[in-house]
Image (cartoon, rainbow, N blue to C red):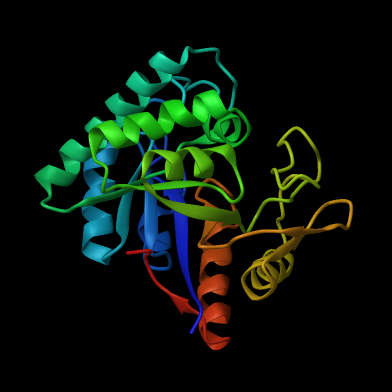
Amino acid sequence: MKKIDLNCDLGESFGSYKLGNDELILSEVTSANIACGFHAGDAHVMYKTVLLAKEKGVAIGAHPGFHDIAGFGRREIPYTSGEITEMVLYQIGALSAFCKAHEVKLSHVKPHGALYNLAAKDPFIAKAIAKAVMLFDSDLLLYGLSGSELIKAGKEVGLRTVSEVFADRTYQNDGSLTSRKSENAIISETELALSQVIQMIETDTVTSVDGQSIPIVAESVCVHGDNEHALLFAKALRENLTKKGVSVRPIR
């Protein structure tokens, strides 16, 4: 039986601002990437989201990003590799504290936004992130874009990596995600998102925006929690994958 992890970026509310439908989505996904206070989230939201994930039996991951609340972590900010390692370590440590408080294990790390996209292409940034994860806990899983430098860097330092694909994003010919600045970056139709995921799981390929068939490894499928269709996507994905005999479950 084929198996797939279904993950979502969550815990992105902060202060008086509420983003996403975390509690409902946690009933559909198998892994949660929880914001660590830099691009989104705060102490109260981290505390609450970790507890919700534990109650739902969902694997918990740290979702570190650039220190950029105003830009939601989607703006590229120049840092040295050492600064990136320290920044990622800091955020993993923050979420780990809430996991300890709720007596649940931190399962994985997945970078957010601009940090994630830079790590997909830049080997120095990818190595800086992998180093942070390794320094914190070599047993943590490292999520990265399928075929990316981050996956390569994680394997090089001895981490267990998870190749991630996206239900609601389009792809370029080199296997990278289409920039959010482009009109065709986001897939908003549920049927199109589902069709793309089924293709990736069944054929190990994805069709680029130019119509090319690109090889891809799909171990975990991401649905963005801030996408207005996230809950609908997650429900439809889980239902349809199960009908096709795919086991939807956490990586471990």
Q: In this rendering, does residue 16 appear at all? A: no
Q: Residue at x 47, y 12 (%)?
A: 80
Q: Residue at x 84, y 51 (%)?
A: 209
Looking at the rendering, which quadrant does residue 244 occupy? Answer: bottom right
Looking at the rendering, which quadrant does residue 31 occupy? Answer: bottom left
Q: 52 or 21, which is in the foreground?
A: 52
- Residue 115, compared with residue 106, is above or below; it is above
Horizontal side of residue 37 vs 201, given as left or right: left
Give x and y (percent) for residue 242.
51, 83
- Residue 126, compared with residue 176, is above or below; it is above
- Residue 29, compared with residue 43, is above or below; it is below
Q: In this rendering, does residue 233 appear at all? A: yes
Give x and y (percent) for residue 51.
21, 52
Give x and y (percent) for residue 211.
88, 58
Horizontal side of residue 120 vs 91, given as left or right: right
Q: Residue furthest right?
A: 210
Q: Quadrant of the C terminus?
A: bottom left
Q: Residue at x 30, y 52 (%)?
A: 60
Q: Residue at x 21, y 42 (%)?
A: 47
Looking at the rendering, which quadrant does residue 11 occupy? Answer: top left
Q: 13 or 156, which is in the foreground?
A: 156
Give x and y (percent) for residue 113.
55, 34
Q: 55 or 199, which is in the foreground?
A: 199
Q: 33 or 23, which is in the foreground?
A: 33
